[in-house]
């Protein structure tokens, strides 16, 4: 069963965009997003096709997170209730679930997925939901086991983010099992028994992730990060013991960004690999959507 939902979130201008005189060109109306081409402002009505001035797109969820004082402001909790709760519900029913953030550098992907200590994001909230006793998402569950792995894809190489500090991180190989499908060879898995252990692993992995300053963001994520939760439930079915295994993949993609000749060679190489992988992802999504 494939159940795909698409959401968009509008964030405020950051300090760099404000300093450069940037303008907010996006409006949200329920599930509709309107984008105004500010470059055409001031031109006569007859000189420009009206369809070029205002573009409209419809999504399953639209979040306005520009100004907290706005009555329509969408908080991290609201995003979790719409998206995170359905992730937990799907996993409890035995389905594999994937949730990923996609967008340009500085668009708020890492904030939405990881959050800050003051405003935690989807990934830590989902970890909390797995260990929250009052939020039972399935009936007949006797016990469960949670195992966590965390990897990044940097310059087309897969690295384990939970192997501690390494002077030179080993590149891991992606293999395909005849029954279980693709997997990463030698990727470490860590069993956790409470939410704190899961959050500690998340924070450890974030600290080991590749970041760098770019024109659009001072601490841009330069790798795709995949936080995987393997959720195993021991249940009784027809009075017989059995196990249901679900995988939750929470993905914070690196942001796309236009290449700049002033960048050093490392930044140009990173950006090229990021854009190439995002184009490939777009091709895969288009093929699955047909």
Image (tube, rainbow, N blue to C red):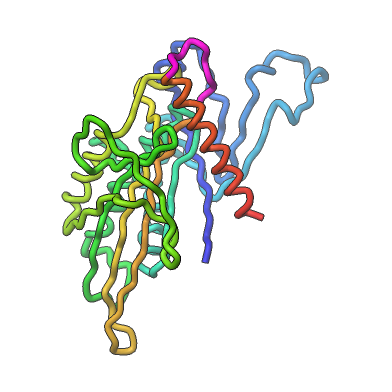
Quarter of the figure with residue 192: bottom left
Furthest residue in direction bottom, as rendered: 239
Q: Quadrant of the C terminus?
A: bottom right
Q: Is residue 264 magenta?
A: yes
**Does the rendering let one see residue 65?**
no
Give percent across and percent down for residue 224: 41, 38
Horizontally, is 155 left or right of 203 in the view? right
Give percent across and percent down for residue 15: 39, 17
* 277 shown above or below 83: above
Give percent across and percent down for residue 209: 30, 34
Residue at x 26%, y 31% (from the top left corner): 168
* 263 shown above or below 24: above
Magenta stretch, residue numbers: 257-265
* 14 shown above or below 110: above
**Does the rendering let one see residue 117?**
yes
- The one of 114 and 33 positioned closer to us in this rendering: 114
Could you tell me what secondary structure mostly forms the magenta stretch?
Answer: loop
Residue at x 37%, y 56% (from the top left corner): 248
Furthest residue in direction right, as rendered: 46
Residue at x 39%, y 69% (from the top left corner): 94
Quarter of the figure with residue 14: top left
Q: Is residue 217 magenta?
A: no
- The one of 72 and 149 positioned closer to us in this rendering: 149
* 201 shown above or below 38: below
């Amino acid at each position: 069963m494939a159940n795909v939902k698409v959401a968009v979130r509008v964030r405020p201008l950051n300090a760099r965009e404000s300093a450069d005189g940037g303008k907010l060109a996006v409006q949200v109306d329920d599930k509709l997003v309107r984008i105004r081409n500010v470059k055409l402002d001031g031109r006569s009505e007859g000189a420009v096709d009206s369809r070029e001035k205002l573009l409209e797109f419809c999504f399953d969820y639209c979040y306005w997170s520009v100004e907290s004082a706005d009555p329509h402001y969408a908080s991290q909790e609201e995003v979790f209730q719409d998206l995170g709760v359905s992730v937990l519900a799907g996993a409890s029913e035995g389905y594999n679930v994937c949730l990923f953030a996609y967008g340009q550098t500085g668009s708020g992907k890492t904030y939405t997925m990881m959050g800050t200590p003051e405003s935690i994001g989807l990934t830590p909230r989902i970890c909390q939901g797995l260990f929250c006793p009052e939020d039972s998402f399935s009936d007949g569950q006797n016990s469960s086991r949670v195992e966590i792995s965390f990897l990044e894809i940097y310059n087309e190489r897969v690295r384990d983010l939970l192997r501690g500090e390494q002077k030179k991180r080993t590149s891991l190989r992606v293999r395909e099992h005849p029954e279980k499908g693709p997997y990463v060879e030698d990727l470490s898995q860590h069993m956790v028994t409470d939410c704190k252990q899961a959050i500690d692993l998340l924070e450890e992995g974030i600290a080991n992730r590749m970041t760098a300053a770019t024109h659009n963001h001072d601490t841009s994520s330069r790798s795709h990060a995949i936080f995987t939760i393997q959720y195993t439930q021991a249940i009784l079915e027809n009075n017989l013991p059995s196990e249901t295994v679900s995988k939750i993949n929470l993905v914070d993609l690196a942001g796309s960004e236009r290449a700049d000749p002033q960048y050093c060679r490392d930044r140009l190489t990173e950006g090229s690999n990021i854009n190439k992988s995002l184009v490939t992802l777009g091709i895969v999504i288009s093929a699955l959507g047909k």
